[in-house]
Image (cartoon, rainbow, N blue to C red):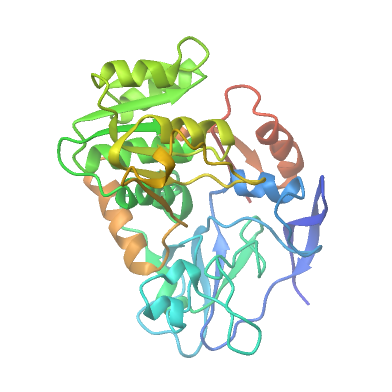
Amino acid sequence: MPLMKAAVFVEPGRIELQDKPIPDVGPNDALVRITTTTTICGTDVHILKGEYPVAPGLTIGHEPVGIIEKLGSNVQGYREGQRVIAGAICPSFTSYACQDGYPSQDGGCACHGYKPMGGWRFGNSIDGTQAEYVLVPDAQANLAPVPDGLSDEEVLMCPDIMSTGFAGAEAANLRIGDIVAVFAQGPIGLCATAGARLRGAGTIIAIDGVNERLEIARRLGADVTLNFREVDVVEEILKLTGGRGVDASIEALGTQTTFESALRVLKPGGTLSSLGVYSSDLTIPLGAFHAGLGDNRIVTSLCPGGKERMRRLLNVVASGRVDLKPLVTHQYRLDDIVAAYDLFAHQRDGVLKVAIKP
């Protein structure tokens, strides 16, 4: 049986590179050979730390860019040898959740219960992408051809980080001229900043504690940058808005502090769009929540997937309206993925995203 290299979750705190069988292709599947890049994501670090449980032996990773190696007999409109991406969220588009307009929540059944986040399968419920090959389920619904002229590095953010960050701006329901504060300028926060610009926000305030990230935020569309290590962010934002507060805030880190600050800077009737992955219970402060009477909205988003979402994101990249290549700060071989995890998990050397090259 042919084997491939894959990064496997063994136990909390331990990921290993192992040999695993190359997957067999079912009628609705596609086998994709990972080419130049996949990445390590913040969610992968939650898995490594045991904060998000997955089964031991699972191949992790959820950002595939590659070439179709083999197609299932039912998959139409694609060809072997074609360059493709697939969203980190790869729904079936047949479930109740999908047909109700929430494909990211695909999964479960009446017999075993309907579970949230079921559309996230790579590196969660099935083997993921930090390997030489990945099996894409429901391939006809999830594969998106990469336009000629775009490199792997240019489209690498589309499957997850770009889709998630843009979803934060979309869920905030930003209108032309709105003032928005984006808390945390990691990869997802930076994409939320870029998405807010594309949505027509009039003033974008980016918050982080690393000046180099704030500089990238400016290049992606931020008008004002605030380093929380140097100023009281809530006080400064209220001053910048004349005490009115922002129309929307986007929380892109997943901590109590950033969530609470994002709530405190909202105007009455404003929206908090939450993208963070939280590893402990949140507390909503009574004053910031106006005792529940402030007409505020708190919305969450899970990375939208599917081939139409990917097509739209690829179109944005091809148009030149956003350039996310600067987010890839480091490159490692798949053979060195354990060292890459150590770098990313400890946020050393100015790392934003690590590209893994099989």
Q: Which residue shows up at 61% across the image and 49% down it?
A: 43
Vertical relation: 215 (above or below) 136: above
Q: Position of residue 341 (x, y in %)?
A: 71, 40
Q: Which residue shows up at 53% across the image and 37% down it?
A: 253
Please state which of residues 26 and 350 is positioned toward the viewer in this rendering. 350
Q: Is residue 213 visible?
A: yes
Q: Is residue 357 visible?
A: no
Please state which of residues 118 and 326 is positioned toward the viewer in this rendering. 118
Q: Which residue shows up at 65% across the image and 63% down it?
A: 124
Residue 140 relative to residue 349: left or right: left
Q: Position of residue 112 (x, y in %)?
A: 66, 84
- Single out the residue that lies furthest toward the top: 230
Q: Which residue shows up at 46% across the image and 62% down it?
A: 87
Please state which of residues 219 and 145 is positioned toward the viewer in this rendering. 219
- Single out the residue that lies furthest toward the left: 176
Quarter of the image for the N terminus: give it.
bottom right
Q: Residue 125, located in which quarter of the rendered image? A: bottom right
Q: Position of residue 195 (x, y in %)?
A: 31, 42
Residue 152 relative to residue 269: left or right: right
The image shows a total of numbered marks equal to 0
Q: Residue 349, located in which quarter of the rendered image? A: top right
Q: Position of residue 217 (x, y in %)?
A: 37, 27
Residue 83 relative to residue 10: left or right: left
